[in-house]
């Protein structure tokens, strides 16, 4: 049986993976946009997911979580800004 800490890290790590995937997808959408409206919309999504993952990482550090277990150790969201 898993303890609460394991369940938390599983949840947090999975959530971080999902947000990272959304960030990467938004980056691709921004690069593939064919007009200004699409670029603005995709760029807004990109910034929202960037802010979300940065906030997750900041909070993980603030609460002294293991960044590797949280799925945030080797991920730099700034690499995906256009």
Image (cartoon, rainbow, N blue to C red):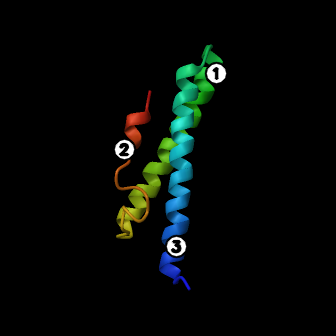
Front residue of 58/11: it is 11
Residue placed farthest to the front in the image? Answer: 1
Task: Name the residue rendered at 58%, 36% in the picture.
Answer: 45
| Mark 2 secondary-structure assignment | loop
Front residue of 56/3: it is 3
In this figure, which residue is indicated by the disc labeled 3? Answer: 8
In this figure, which residue is indicated by the disc labeled 2? Answer: 76
Dot 1 or dot 2: first in sequence order is 1
In this figure, which residue is indicated by the disc labeled 1? Answer: 38
Task: Name the residue rendered at 52%, 40% in the picture.
Answer: 23
Between disc 1 and disc 2, the foreground one is: 2
Q: Quadrant of residue 30?
A: top right
Task: Name the residue rendered at 38%, 35% in the picture.
Answer: 79
Front residue of 40/7: it is 7
Q: Position of residue 8 (x, y in %)?
A: 52, 73
Marks 3,2: beta carbons within 8 A: no
The residues bearing labels 1 and 2 have C-alpha atoms spaced at a distance of 25 Å
Q: Is residue 79 shown left or right of residue 32? A: left
| Mark 3 secondary-structure assignment | helix
């Amino acid at each position: 049986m898993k303890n609460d800490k394991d369940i938390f890290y599983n949840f947090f790590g999975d959530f971080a993976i999902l947000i990272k995937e959304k960030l990467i997808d938004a980056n691709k959408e921004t690069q593939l946009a064919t007009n200004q409206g699409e670029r603005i919309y995709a760029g807004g999504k990109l910034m929202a997911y960037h802010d979300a993952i940065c906030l997750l990482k900041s909070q993980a550090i603030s609460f002294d979580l293991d960044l590797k277990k949280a799925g945030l150790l080797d991920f730099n969201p700034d690499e995906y800004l256009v």
